[in-house]
Amino acid sequence: MTKTLKDVTLSVLDLAPVLQGGTAKETFQRTVDLAQYAEELGYYRYWMAEHHNMPGIASSATAVLIGHVAGATNKIRVGSGGIMLPNHAPLVIAEQFGTLESLYPGRIDLGLGRAPGTDYQTSRALRRDEKGGAEFEGMVQELRSYFQPFNGVNVRAVPGEGLDIPIWLLGSSGFSARLAGELGLPFAFASHFAPENTLPALDIYRSSFTPSTVLDKPYVIVGANVIAADTDDEAKWLSTSQQQQFLELTRGTPGPLKPPIESLDSICMPHEKAAVERQLASSIVGSSETVKGRLEEFVLNTEADEVIVHSQIYDHHKRLKSFKIVKGVHEQ
């Protein structure tokens, strides 16, 4: 059966953007406000992601922020999209998320990635093992073992042991897609910044999927940059904040989220603009009518079970409005 937009679950990915001239404290206030609004609108889950040495992203202490958001909401699921597991000892993550699940039972998700979420020098500062990415599968299995009921082992995760915390594998290529399929785990793909790899990775996941005690069939979340406004022109203008942020990333000079500008052409070279457009190729920008059509097409192409919406908009109230428009077209 062909999936439509109404068939999918809708969730939120918040990278906790720090605005130009703003502070992390202000960012966290906006994050709580958005999470409460997303819950009110009926979004299913609210994820935050681990990044380091990024002046424009304040979610580096991801587990701490998850607890803050879960404590300020009532029913929306809250989790990581994701924790970069090779940056940490699996036991520490089991204890952190065991603590979160104990505080907010039935509401915590643990999404795992294998990238560092930062540059090489910062990876060294995190004491990340250079073999971490290659040993990701073993780390995932070790982490999962800590959530099993006590079986006489010497190392136990307290809290964590015996808790049912959903684990997701995240990816932007085929590696985690295959691993998620082989382990029978749900898979979330970062199509919001790796659009060219989306369909190949989803094919790998589905073709390698083995039923497990977790899932009897594949379950896919896809990320989508969505910027919605009253008109196409306004949405395109708002989207230039995200474009500027990606431009700075391509230059190796990440910075805070900047106000919109009239055009990216005035601040970059043609090859830089092409690189930004390539990374943001799957972005959905426009009025409610435009967004509905593009989202329908996105769901049709990916056959996703869930879309997690990411909206880097400088003006907080316009960001809230964007999420309202998206939820509105979802329910039409």
Image: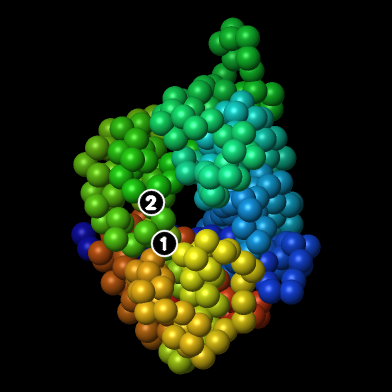
Q: Residue, x 44% and y 25% (percent of image)?
A: 138
Residue 123 point in image, percent of width and height = 57, 41
Residue 232 occupies which quadrant of the picture? bottom left
Residue 277 falls left or right of residue 226: left
Give the total of numbered labels.
2
Q: Residue, x 46% and y 64% (percent of image)?
A: 250
Which quadrant of the rendered structure holds the C terminus? bottom left
Query: Residue 172 got which mark?
Result: 2
Can you identify the residue that label 1 sits on? 193
Residue 192, compared with residue 93, is above or below; it is below
Which amino acid does the dot numbered 1 rest on? Phe
Which amino acid does the dot numbered 2 rest on? Ser
**SS at mark 2?**
loop
Residue 1 falls left or right of residue 225: left
Which quadrant of the rendered structure holds the N terminus? bottom left
Residue 280 occupies which quadrant of the picture? bottom left
- Nearest the viewer among 159 and 243 is 243
Q: Choose the circle earlier in sequence order: 2 or 1.
A: 2
Residue 145 point in image, percent of width and height = 52, 22
Q: Distance between the residues labelled 2 and 1?
A: 8 Å
